[in-house]
Amino acid sequence: MLPTMLLGFDVGGTNARALLIDAATGDVVDRDREPSRGSGEDLVATLAQMAERLVTRNSCSLSAVGCGVAGLAHRSGVVHFSPNLPGVLEYPVGPELAERLGVPVEIMNDASAGAWAEARLGAGRGSDDFILVTLGTGIGTGFVCGGRLLGGHNGFAGESGHMVVDAHGPIHHTGQRGPWEYFASGDGLGRLGRAAAEVGRFPAALADAGSPADITGFTVAEALGRGDHNAEEVFAEFCGHVALGLANLVLIFDPERIVLGGGLVSVGEPLRTGVSGHLDELILGGQYRPSVAVVLAELGDDAGALGAALWAQESVD
Amino acid sequence: MLPTMLLGFDVGGTNARALLIDAATGDVVDRDREPSRGSGEDLVATLAQMAERLVTRNSCSLSAVGCGVAGLAHRSGVVHFSPNLPGVLEYPVGPELAERLGVPVEIMNDASAGAWAEARLGAGRGSDDFILVTLGTGIGTGFVCGGRLLGGHNGFAGESGHMVVDAHGPIHHTGQRGPWEYFASGDGLGRLGRAAAEVGRFPAALADAGSPADITGFTVAEALGRGDHNAEEVFAEFCGHVALGLANLVLIFDPERIVLGGGLVSVGEPLRTGVSGHLDELILGGQYRPSVAVVLAELGDDAGALGAALWAQESVD
């Protein structure tokens, strides 16, 4: 009899990654990736081919398949809207993939998937109430409340990056005024870096990038890694923006812990301490509340696919 | 054998109200109220006296006691901080009352208690995912997620009124800049009314109140009830403020339903339609989401005490 595995996907705007996972141990046995562009039909075909290739290559069968996607992934498996996948609108990715593979498929928000992975195998272990916030190009959030993943009525919970924190602030590409993501994402960090460079307060970034317009969040993070003083100032402001939205979420959810994930986690300890310091100042009634632990995510880029697979297993059991 | 009842308290800044409840039917059998001022010790004595009086008067015994309090009520029964009860700080109201009465006592946030009452007996019935927002002097929120009450790690969840929505906005009495409560509470409505009156755009309120400074949310609500056109303009703006924070909560929680409660519910249908209309405009990606039903709370002033009692019963079972 063939060994039974879990399969997890994480579908981004450029690539879809696949992890084949030992259901008993959570170990990643094999991995694959393919470009993710195209229609809903294209996406299902891409995912199915990766699944079939991994199954053949590892002589196994699948017990469940999970798939994390940015945006609005309905409980039913229909991807309503994903900012990363403009060709996939109101498309039944889950049901079609399940039919094609002959196994149960769960489609879910990628940050929720990441939160579930961190809950089971990473920085959320031991806590029944924590928030994962992924700081990448945008902001994703996933919530574990009372030991359970917050899904919402449709499966759309966790779109906190779009929470308005500055109602008279600048207009974001979403059309909203002053959403948290505008300030506290990797894009927001790049914007702060460009603003500093434009007034002559970030020469190192200017030298690295060539022109102010080419400064990104990565430019700032790199300069920070070299101990650049201007980068530290920019980053301190950025951490304040991250903490502002987190303070709102702490008031709403009362978590024990906040797990910082996404690409910006590569900054490491300065991100953790920067956010934590601002957070303590910002939380109303902080003197009457235990302080919230801020920790770094542990599962890196695998979190989304891993969590989706673990969640799919849970849904089958 | 004496019949067994539940007892629910709702402790406000002026009065503590008590409801004696038939555990089997949820019917309110008797009620009482007492002033709530004083220290933690005073509060426990007041609540114990009301409990003993109700038990004697109705010849019953108590199976569980629940108590809703504004602010930070810890799961352990310790009231860490309540804006309404400045004399009660870090005080073990629950354990002391339990010892005095000889029955289990649950202390909880009043809006969470209200949400649980609406879930069981009111406007939340039939929904596993809804938000209760109480619009009174301030804003309270309670969340039912996946059929369970969101408590948070300490029991402090639901302080969404303090969510910052206008980071460069006016300073609230809490010291925060631009929290939702500043704009969208009964106090916020009064402020909008005063601002309109000061520039001559609300003569009816000025006539009612005598001076702009004496215009409150009630003044606006009364003028609205008489069909005053200026009041309608003020109220439309107010509904936009309510909807702004609710849009954030919808993005975060993905509820099926929003239940509007608190004193301002007396406005009725204009509140419901005003908030609902603005909400549909404000929710990002609304074209890809089922619209969220906005309904009025059904349990009025009893919700907090009723919900606390039902929650205490749940905790005992």
Image (cartoon, coloured by chain):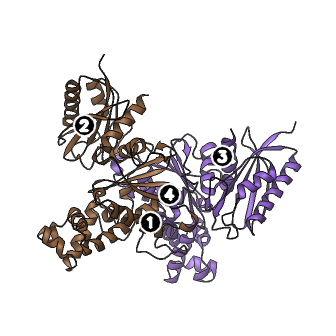
Chain colours: A purple, B brown
Q: Is residue A293 at least partly visible in the picture? A: yes
Asked if labels 4 and 3 share a chain, the reply is no
Q: Which residue extends farthest top?
A: B1
Read off the residue under disc 4: B252
Disc nearer the start of the sequence (4/1)? 4
Q: CA distance from mark 4 to mark 1?
A: 14 Å
Crowding near pointer 1: few (<14 within 10 Å), some, many (20+)? many
Q: Nearer the viewer, mark 2 or mark 3?
A: 2
SS at circle 2: strand
Residue B100 placement: quadrant? top left
Which of the labelled discs sits on residue B179, or is there none? none
Name the mark nearer the viewer: 4 or 2.
Answer: 2
Quarter of the image with the N terminus of chain B is top left
The span from disc 4 to disc 3 (Cα, nearest Å) is 20 Å
Amino acid at the residue labelled 4: Ile
Q: What is the crowding at mark 3: few (fewer than 14 residues within 10 Å), some, or many (at least 20)?
A: many
Query: Residue B22 placed where, x, y %?
Result: 33, 30
* Image mark 4: chain: B
Q: CA distance from mark 4 to mark 2?
A: 34 Å
Same chain assignment for discs 2 and 3: no
What amino acid type should be assigned to the residue bearing mark 2? Answer: Ala
Residue to which mark 3 is pinned: A311
Name the residue type under label 1.
Leu
Q: Are marks 4 and 1 on the same chain?
A: yes
Residue bearing the label numbered 2: B18
Label 4 or label 1, whichever lies nearer to me, is: 1
In this image, B137 relative to A267: left or right?
left
Same-subunit check for callouts 3 and 1: no
